[in-house]
Image (cartoon, grey):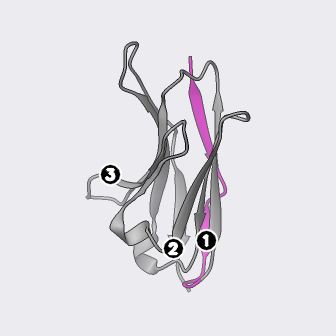
Amino acid sequence: QVKLVESGGGLVQPGGSLRLSCAASGTIPGAAVMGWFRQVPGKQRELVATVTSGGTTYYADYAEDRFTVSRNNAKNTLDLQMNDLKSEDTAVYYCKLQRKMTPTMTVWGQGIQVTVSS
């Protein structure tokens, strides 16, 4: 059974930086995409960035120039470096692992709060 645990959230001032980490435990399947999503109260969870096992990345438009996602397959970790943070980046950030090929798998972390405020 795969488990995801996020760390690194907290309070940061506008313009600041924060690095989120996600540690995966258990047997990680091959060809699994990992990514970061975020959610604010009253809104749907939205994609931030994803990375395939081969290292191909995808970013939401708002994250393209400020965020960097990275994955270490050997250590089963996923990071999100966030720079030039804005108040609208305040959200609960979730780590996700998904494999769409058989056997399929979808796992979410418990989420971690990021607050951007002066």
Q: Which mark is residue 11?
A: 1
Residue found farthest to the right: 75
For marks 3 and 2, give the CA distance: 19 Å
| SS for dot 2 | loop
Q: Which mark is residue 45?
A: 3
- Closer mark to the observer between disc 1 and disc 2: 2
Give the tally of numbered discs. Answer: 3
For marks 1 and 3, give the CA distance: 20 Å
- Point out the tag, 1 or 3, that comes first from the N-terminus: 1
Callout 3, which amino acid? Arg
Density class for disc 1 (Cα within 10 Å; few <14, some 14-19, many ≥20) is some
The residue lying at 58 percent from left, 28 percent from top is 3
Relative side of 16 to 92, left or right: right
Measuring from the top left, give residue 68's x and y in whole percent.
Answer: 56, 62
Callout 2, which amino acid? Arg
Residue 114 occupies which quadrant of the picture? Answer: bottom right
The residue lying at 55 percent from left, 45 percent from top is 55
Residue found farthest to the top: 103
Q: Which residue is mark 2?
A: 66
| SS for dot 1 | strand
- Point out the tag, 3 or 2, that comes first from the N-terminus: 3
| SS for dot 3 | loop
Q: Is residue 90 above or below residue 108?
A: below
Of 11 and 50, the residue lying toward us: 50
Callout 1, which amino acid? Leu
